[in-house]
Image (cartoon, helix red, strand yellow):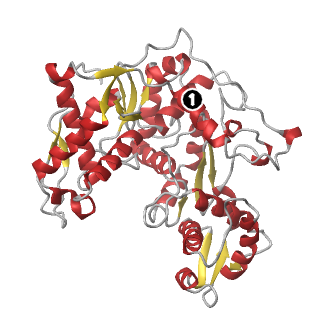
């Protein structure tokens, strides 16, 4: 694989600064004067030209950089249901109603208007929402008003709207008397939603994808780009769950060298797959393991208990090993679920993008994984043991009376980290979980006002370990 000259114009003394700009651009949906923190925009803009070249060559990503914002426009090879980039202020992910409201609100902004009142916005938005079966908007319904508030807060946080007068809260409490006035930043609005193709031309969500399985045109370096994209977008990539072309690129030392130089992280290549190791939590939205947080602690301690069970020769005999579905199988299922909600009316058929057939698994693909199945009953018993060993109060007031809820939250976290995957009746442990088999409970940090327990690794992986 030919070298790409990653960070070719960056002096060695400034490579760390460039790598920090790369991480900021990739881990934030939008970089502005205030997001993710003051000074970040200036730092990224310093390297805008080099970022644009490297992102285009390595990933096929476009970088939109102005004096007021930077955004990376990604090109997706697959959909990933674990990526929830839109969150309300209280940390809950946007549901379908909020996503629909957000798209309708953005569609209302015309460049001829530099400001809009909340009353005018709702007056134009409500009829559009009410024409959509199953959506609708009723100002007397609290859930509908809360969804509008979350959408506008999200836009304000990103600078697309600026509150110049009034209050969203006052409107939410009294839609008759309350109002607010917003200044509109049309440049930011325009880059917040940039689909690969016009959505009205799509007969399937697969038309938004690049490469195999999508409507994108094949390129000579398609497999290399898909491999690099997978590694920067996912916590871990398993050889057995990607096609043979991508697996071959992932094994090539040039890939590790390019991405290590680009991001400043270490590429770990094991027998089962590859990951970008990030011990300092500089390139992730889910640091793990970490100090504090009942869900993170429970997830780590569950991994340790499952590892102990598998290392016991007697207990291991009772464990069933199964082959997890390949990524292509998951993708077919996810696309079918997305397309089931696709409206039949309004698609411009003569300009429609038709997705290519998804690639079938071939004989040259990597050998399948063998993943241990942990039944729900085992997991429940492990959580009960943790409550007995550590005391229910150690899992915070939110979870001390809800061990089953904590188990579900921990499983969700571990699934998003690709350390396990859900399976009927339980979960399948994926190879990367073994990186954390030495997790132990740390002592309370006295500097932590909440006195929460943390996690640490008692020792690193033994040399030559495959997981």
Answer with the quarter of the image where residue 436 lies: top left
Report which residue position mark 1 lands on: 226
Q: Residue furthest bottom?
A: 177
Q: In this orientation, does residue 5 appear?
A: no
Q: Is residue 290 or residue 17 the one in the foreground? A: 290
Task: Pinpoint residue 379: horizontal percent, then vertical percent.
Answer: 26, 39
Q: Nearer the viewer, residue 290 or 329?
A: 329
Quarter of the image for residue 424 reads: top left
The x, y position of residue 217, in whole percent, is: 73, 28
Q: Using the image, determine if residue 4 lies above or below residue 283.
A: above
Q: Who's the residue at 60% across and 43% down the image?
A: 74
Above/below status of 409 relative to 206: below
Does residue 3 lie above or below 106 as drawn? above
- The picture quadrant where one finds residue 2 is top right
Q: Secondary structure at mark 1?
A: helix
In this view, the residue in front, 31 or 298, is 298
Q: Can residue 434 be seen at all in this image of the molecule?
A: yes
Structural crowding at the residue carrying mark 1, measured as other residues with C-alpha within 10 Å and reported as few (<14), some (14–19) or many (≥20): many
Residue 91, position as x, y percentages in the image: 43, 61
Q: Residue at x 73, y 80 (%)?
A: 120
Q: Which residue is most to the right?
A: 350
Horizontal side of 31 relative to 416 (left or right) equals right
Coordinates of residue 214 in the picture (x, y in percent):
68, 31
Compared to residue 80, the image places residue 183 above or below, namely: below
Q: Quadrant of the N terminus?
A: top right
- The quarter of the picture where the C terminus appears is top left
């Amino acid at each position: 694989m030919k070298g790409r000259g990653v960070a070719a114009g960056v002096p060695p003394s400034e490579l760390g600064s460039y790598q920090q700009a790369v991480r900021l651009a990739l881990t934030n949906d939008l970089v502005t004067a205030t997001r993710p923190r003051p000074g970040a925009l200036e730092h990224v803009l310093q390297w805008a030209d080099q970022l644009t070249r490297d992102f285009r060559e390595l990933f096929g990503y476009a970088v939109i950089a102005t004096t007021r914002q930077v955004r990376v426009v990604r090109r997706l090879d697959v959909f990933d249901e674990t990526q929830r980039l839109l969150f309300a202020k209280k940390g809950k992910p946007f549901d379908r109603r909020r996503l629909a409201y957000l798209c309708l609100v953005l569609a209302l902004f015309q460049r001829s208007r530099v400001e809009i009142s909340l009353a005018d916005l709702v007056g134009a938005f409500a009829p559009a929402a009410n024409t959509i079966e199953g959506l609708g908007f009723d100002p007397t319904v609290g859930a509908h008003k809360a969804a509008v508030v979350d959408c506008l807060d999200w836009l304000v946080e990103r600078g697309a709207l600026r509150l110049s007068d009034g209050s969203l809260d006052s409107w939410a409490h009294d839609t008759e008397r309350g109002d607010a006035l917003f200044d509109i930043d049309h440049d930011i609005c325009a880059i917040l939603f940039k689909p690969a193709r016009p959505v009205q031309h799509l007969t399937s969500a697969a038309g938004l994808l690049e490469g195999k399985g999508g409507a994108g045109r094949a390129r000579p370096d398609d497999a290399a780009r898909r491999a690099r994209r997978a590694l920067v977008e996912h916590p871990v990539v398993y050889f057995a769950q990607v096609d043979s072309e991508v697996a071959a690129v992932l094994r090539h030392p040039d890939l590790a060298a390019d991405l290590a130089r680009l991001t400043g992280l270490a590429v770990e290549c094991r027998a089962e797959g590859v990951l970008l190791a990030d011990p300092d939590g500089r390139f992730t939205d889910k640091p793990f393991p970490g100090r504090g947080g009942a869900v993170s602690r429970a997830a780590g301690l569950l991994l340790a208990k499952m590892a102990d069970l598998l290392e016991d020769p007697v207990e291991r005999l009772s464990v069933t090993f199964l082959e997890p579905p390949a990524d292509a199988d998951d993708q077919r299922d996810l696309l079918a679920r997305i397309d089931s909600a696709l409206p039949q009316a309004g698609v411009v058929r003569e300009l429609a993008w038709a997705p290519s057939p998804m690639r079938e698994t071939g004989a040259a693909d990597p050998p399948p994984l063998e993943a241990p199945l942990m039944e729900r009953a085992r997991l429940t018993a492990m959580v009960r043991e943790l409550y007995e060993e550590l005391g229910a109060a150690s899992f915070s007031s939110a979870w001390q009376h809800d061990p089953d809820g904590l188990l579900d939250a921990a499983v969700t976290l571990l699934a998003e980290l690709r350390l396990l995957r859900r399976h009927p009746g339980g979960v399948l442990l994926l190879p990367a979980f073994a990186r954390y088999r030495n997790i132990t409970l740390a002592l309370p940090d006295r500097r932590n006002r909440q006195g929460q327990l943390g996690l640490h690794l008692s020792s690193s992986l033994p040399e030559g370990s495959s997981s």
